[in-house]
Image (cartoon, rainbow, N blue to C red):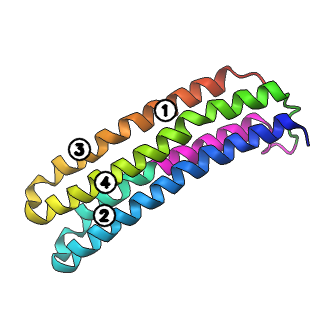
């Protein structure tokens, strides 16, 4: 296997793995907070669940990026492209924005979700504010995803 294709596949792996690790970590923390709240106030399950799942979107962005990379290099068509080393590096580097920002923003969004769940326990009527505050952290994951997609679209395989 040529180095270029290895680098491109590494880009897909990194783009998927890091945001999924961050999302799993964040979902775990928020899930623990939600479990504590719901054990005392089961009627707050829906709002707590929404706050818990918000940091999971970065993993989805990483998955989307991995699919785009695999499609770009022909893995779904049965005919893997002849990817030069230079192109492989370009694909790997294009994957880094969503990989790194997805990892970190999911962890930080999880922290905001945990505090939002705590707020939900004290002031249920403020759930909308807690959701907005958590969603704001995701803005940067969306920007990173857009940059990754733009970079992948200008790379010629």
Left or right: where does residue 103 sit relative to residue 73?
A: left
Residue 118: x and y in percent read 18, 62
The Cα–Cα distance between marks 4 and 2, rounded to whole angstroms, is 15 Å
Please give left or right for residue 11 compared with residue 105 in the image.
Answer: right
| Sequence-first disc among 4 and 3 | 4
Image quadrant in which the N terminus is located: top right
Horizontally, is 138 left or right of 40 in the view?
A: right
Residues at badges 1 and 4 in contact (C-beta under 8 Å)? no
* In-image side of 77 versus 136 (left or right): right
Q: Which residue carries the number 1 mark?
A: 144
Which residue is under mark 4? 111
Q: Which of marks 2 and 1 is in front?
A: 1
Q: From the top left corner, tell me how far across and down residue 155 is, in percent.
A: 71, 22
Please tell me how crowded label 1 is: few (under 14), some (14-19), or many (20+) other residues with Cα within 10 Å.
Answer: many
Magenta-colored stretch includes residue 69: yes
Using a 10 Å C-alpha cutoff, classify the residue at mark 4 as few (fewer than 14 neighbours), some (14 to 19) or many (20 or more): some
Q: Is residue 122 above or below residue 78?
A: below
**Secondary element type, mark 1:** helix
Q: Mark 3 points at which residue?
A: 133
The secondary structure type at the circle numbered 2 is helix
Look at the picture and state if 41 lies above or below 25.
below
The Cα atoms of the two marked residues, 2 and 3, are separated by: 15 Å
- Magenta region: which residues? 58-78
Among the two numbered marks 4 and 2 on one chain, the one whose residue lies closer to the N terminus: 2
Per the rendering, the mark at residue 49 is 2
Is 6 within the magenta?
no
* Camera-nearest residue between 125 and 88: 88
User: Residue at the location (31% across, 54% down)?
Assistant: 111
**Mark 3 residue element:** helix
């Amino acid at each position: 296997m040529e180095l270029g294709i290895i680098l491109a596949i590494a880009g897909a792996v990194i783009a998927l793995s890091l945001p999924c690790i961050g999302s799993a970590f964040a979902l775990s923390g928020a899930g623990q907070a939600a479990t504590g709240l719901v054990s005392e106030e089961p009627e707050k399950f829906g709002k707590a669940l929404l706050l818990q799942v918000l940091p999971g979107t970065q993993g989805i962005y990483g998955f989307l990026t991995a699919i785009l990379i695999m499609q770009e290099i022909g893995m779904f068509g049965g005919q893997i492209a002849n990817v030069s080393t230079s192109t492989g590096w370009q694909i790997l580097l294009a994957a880094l924005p969503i990989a790194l920002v997805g990892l970190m923003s999911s962890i930080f969004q999880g922290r905001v979700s945990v505090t939002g769940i705590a707020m939900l326990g004290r002031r249920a009527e403020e759930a909308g504010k807690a959701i907005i505050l958590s969603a704001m952290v995701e803005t940067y994951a969306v920007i990173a995803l857009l940059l990754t997609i733009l970079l992948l679209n200008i790379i010629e395989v």
